[in-house]
Amino acid sequence: MTDADAGTGSKARPERRSQAWFGAEGRAGMIYRSWMRNQGLGHEVFDGRPVIGIAVSASELAPCNAHLDRVAEAVKRGVWQAGGLPLAFPTMATGETLMRPTAMLFRNLMAMEVEELIRANPLDGVVLLSGCDKTTPAMLMGAASVDLPAVMVTGGPMLNGKYRGRDVGSGTAVWQFEEDLKTGRMTQEECFYAEGCMARSNGHCMTMGTASTMACMAESLGMQLPGSATWPAVDARRFETAQAAGKRVVEMVDEDLRPSKVMTRAAFENAIRTNAAIGGSTNAIIHLAAIAGRLGVDLSLDDFDGLAREVPTLVNLQPSGKYLMEDFCYAGGLPAVHRELAGAGLLHTKQITVTGQSIAENTATAERIGDEVITPLSTPFQEAGTGTAVLRGNLAPNGAVLKQSAATPELLQHRGRALVFDSPEAYHKVCDDPTLDVTADDILVIRGAGPKGYPGMPEVSNVPLPTKLLKAGVTDMIRICDGRMSGTGYGTVVLHVAPESAVGGPLALVRTGDEIELDVAGRRLSLLISDEELAERRARWTPPEPKHRSGYAWLYTEHVTQANEGADLTFLRGSRGHAVPRDSH
Ligand code: FES
Ligand code: MG
């Protein structure tokens, strides 16, 4: 435990944390118990049994998490079954689709809330219920900083979207529908109808977008039960797994099996390799870096490139491939992938997980069903080395990333003229203009979308191609941005450029007409101007006016780290432990 606060817990720490509340004598104990009894709880439940918090990020404003109240009921069954006392509590939910300016602005706020709620309450362990993109890393970050026994249960993907006899993937299909609408292949009415077809059950995006990726990351880090990432949200086995998680966390309290023992450096390496094998979202890089920062695990961008390079992509899912999460589940799910990787020596097989067993033990009997959705290692969907590449150069001294599997191979080695926009909006204003001076060989540079500059580092980097080029049949061109890309997005897009333009990164100094060279094989991103010219431009650069002078957005912009460090707030890094705070009565 680090930074133990000055509470009563540091000295005579009771056997169970919750007993500092419910086992207390006199007036304070009476207050702690009595008010809880208004929920119909009998006196006997305060007998020292493990008290398990269930952190529920259900919200009608975060549709991907809307069903988590029902998942919580299943968790409660398991906790009671194992002799614990379950107490569910709501957390904020960062819904990806509605929140402005971007849900990412609030990931750290949610992490902070989760952390403080766990620590401030009489809890011995916690089950984390998440779903939509940022809710999973936020909960893992918060739980890591408290370091009490914790199991995650993600809410599961939606059923496959079905439109006119074909599968449509959430997110990914939106980009396609938009292009079809712009080019006249679809009418507005057809689009309205397709909206409903794409999201036809509870759950999060069923492509291998960020939510599915982070669910798989939570399982690969050892924080969810095996199979938990892939059961569809409405599958009965999702609820069965949730019940098992409730049961298991009670045992974990006795075993003192905490996040810091589960999420070790080896677990992060397992997660990074698994991300390559599943063709996961680039956002995993930022989220894993932020979670690692909470645990003091040293993880650099180069680890992501180096570890992923050895791993072929086995899972053929949109946006890089063809299938969706429901298919992945029926093909054996993530346990089948882990077993393949373990068999090839690509996993740290001894790493302990929340089951109390190793990742290899968990998946020893997992089965890969068919060769289509989860391909065999011998004939993988994509060869090793085609995963996410980390680029550096005078345009991205602290790194940038590119998802090769979502890119056009011919563009991975390219030199082109920069067309620079100070914000995504500036580009959107002109992108439909038929007279826009742009060719498919140009490189669109979109800046002002970093953690501090936007603020919050939104998923705007894969801006749509200029309509003029789309109409001419162009399907891709290089885009470079200091923002992120949705895990459901695709294209040859250089993301997460660090340092971002708002703090004076070289991206701020590019001008329309400059030449840029992208060399993915050589992992280089270069602005082809002299060092002297670059220095001159830097000397003349003035930082943009701060967008916020008070409120949370101000706090965020004052303290947010760059993309390569996980875009966490500096003062939230590390663990603050779970010492029992001082009494309020
Ligand atoms: Fe919530 Fe995609 S919008 S997971
Ligand atoms: Mg997203």
Image: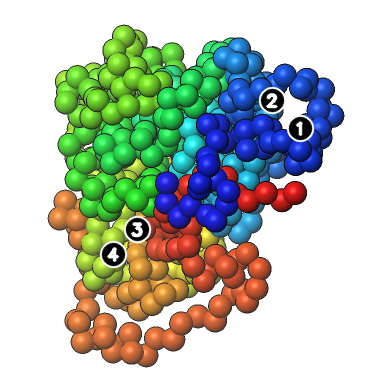
Contact, mark 1 vs mark 2 (Cβ under 8 Å): yes
Q: How many numbered dots are placed on residues in this image?
A: 4
According to the image, label 2 marks what residue? 46
Kind of residue sitting beneath label 4 = Asn
Up the image or down, 123 lies above or below 396; here it is above
Up the image or down, 185 lies above or below 326; here it is below
Label 1, label 2: how far apart the Cα atoms are: 8 Å
According to the image, label 3 marks what residue? 564
Contact, mark 3 vs mark 4 (Cβ under 8 Å): yes
Label 4, label 2: how far apart the Cα atoms are: 52 Å
Q: Nearer the viewer, residue 482 or 465?
A: 482
Kind of residue sitting beneath label 1 = Arg
According to the image, label 4 marks what residue? 398
Q: Nearer the viewer, residue 482 or 516?
A: 482
Label 3, label 4: how far apart the Cα atoms are: 7 Å
Q: Position of residue 25 (x, y in %)?
A: 72, 35
Kind of residue sitting beneath label 3 = Asn
At x 17% / y 23%, what residue is drawn?
344
Give the mark, 1 or 2, whose residue is nearer the N terminus: 1
